[in-house]
Image (cartoon, rainbow, N blue to C red):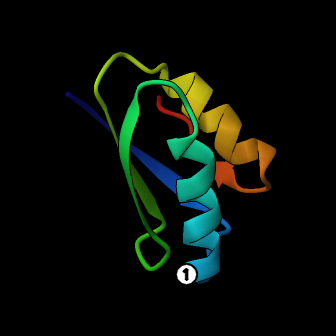
Amino acid sequence: MKETILKVRGMVCNGCEERIKKALKDMSGVEEVKADHNKGEVKVIAKEYVARRDLEEKIEDIGFDVEKEN
């Protein structure tokens, strides 16, 4: 299992969390998604490799901003 933590801007409520969870759970390899709008954080647990960039793009496609890794 691989865990990826993303910092997400624009999540303001439980509804935002649910939109992100639904979008990411539909991706191949993703097992579990935990989103916390209070922390501005999304944790993704995947059973196989899922590119961080693919996760970022999926979140951005539904209207949120993801902080890029340096």
Residue found 68% across the figure and 68% down from its top: 10
* Rendered image quadrant of residue 30: top left
Residue 67 visible somewhere in the drawing: no
Dot 1: few (<14), some (14–19), or many (≥20) neighbours within 10 Å?
few
Figure check: 15 above or below 46: below
Q: Where is residue 60 in the image (x, y as percent from the top left)?
A: 73, 45
Name the foreground residue: 1 vs 56.
Answer: 1
Name the foreground residue: 21 vs 38.
Answer: 21
Name the foreground residue: 10 vs 62.
Answer: 62
- Determine whether the residue tagged by mark 1 lies in a helix, strand or loop: helix
* Rendered image quadrant of residue 46: top left
Q: Where is residue 20 in the image (x, y as percent from the top left)?
A: 60, 57
Q: Position of residue 27 (x, y in %)?
A: 56, 32
Q: Position of residue 14 (x, y in %)?
A: 55, 81
Residue found 48% across the figure and 53% down from its top: 7
The residue that label 1 is drawn on is 14
Name the foreground residue: 54 vs 39.
Answer: 54
